[in-house]
Amino acid sequence: MRIIILAAGLALAGCGQGAQDAPETAAPVTTPAATQSAQTSSELAVGPEVDDANIINGMWMPRVVRLGPPAVFNQLRPYCGQAFEGRVISDDPRDADWAAEVLTIHFRECSDDEIRVPLHVGENRSRTWILTYEGWPGICPHFAPGPTQLNGQEVIMMDAQCWNRSVTLKHDHRHEDGSADVLTMYGGTGTDFSTPGRMEFPADPYSRELFERENIPASMENTWSITVTETSFTYELSRPERYFAAEFDLTRPVEAPPAPGGHE
């Protein structure tokens, strides 16, 4: 007997995540096969049972597994409400003004899908980093449909559904009165979470257009990144012939600074 089934695959960021984030799976959204176990991104989340109860109009309807934010996003949650001091650790002379100041980050606002982190450079309170998580279902681009065997029956895999994830980093720059700076809300979106504790954010189309319009085309090649360990938080900016990095000590909380500009 040949059965046509619709298979749901478990995929991580952009359907390309490794198995290390598997513990982050949450409760399934639909559960016709309630005993089914989640697999890695390279496997289908189908079976082991295929029976009449799972077949609807000739198609077997497996569960879809909804993933939460990636591990590196969740690593920041315990610091919500706390502030930490840091310093410039790169050596570009163009960053001398920043290197002479005490840098302070404040994990000021946290929700299920957003973390806002004001960055204070000395007395300058104009900058806030905004990290936003998004998850959505989609078709696995790497899945090859076709005949296969499942529980001794010949079946045809018609499709596979993935759970896609992304984290976006934006730089919110504001003046003391709360008005937006001309260079604001630039950043990028990361979908590769294969390196534990690290996310990278290549400049997105909005940012590239902004930099071109403001006559700073070199910034169109920007990639920002954050790296989180048990003891430190590192923010980096890189592009050809440009590198900036600041490191913050997560083991020594400090007094929370004033609200950033426009957020009093």
Image (cartoon, rainbow, N blue to C red):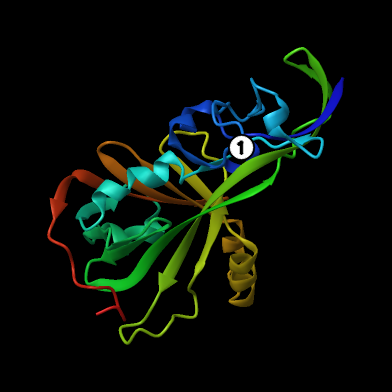
Residue 72 placement: quadrant: top left
Residue under label 1, please give it: 63
User: The residue under label 1 is which amino acid type?
Assistant: Arg
At horizontal 57% and vertical 62% (from top left) the residue drawn is 219
**In the image, 49: left or right of 235?**
right
Secondary element at image label 1 = loop
Given residues 220 and 32, the one toward you in this image is 32
Residue at the image point whose x is 80% and y is 40% from the top: 57
Q: Can residue 243 be seen in this view?
A: no
Quick one: quadrant of the N terminus?
top right
Residue 78 in view, yes or no: yes
Residue placed furthest toward the front? 52
The image quarter containing residue 33 is top right
Instruction: Please state if 194 lies on the left or on the right of 76 as rendered.
Output: right
Instruction: In the rendered view, tell whether residue 213 sits above or below residue 116.
Output: below
Taking 161 as reference, is 150 above or below it? Answer: above
Q: In which quarter of the image is residue 98?
A: bottom left
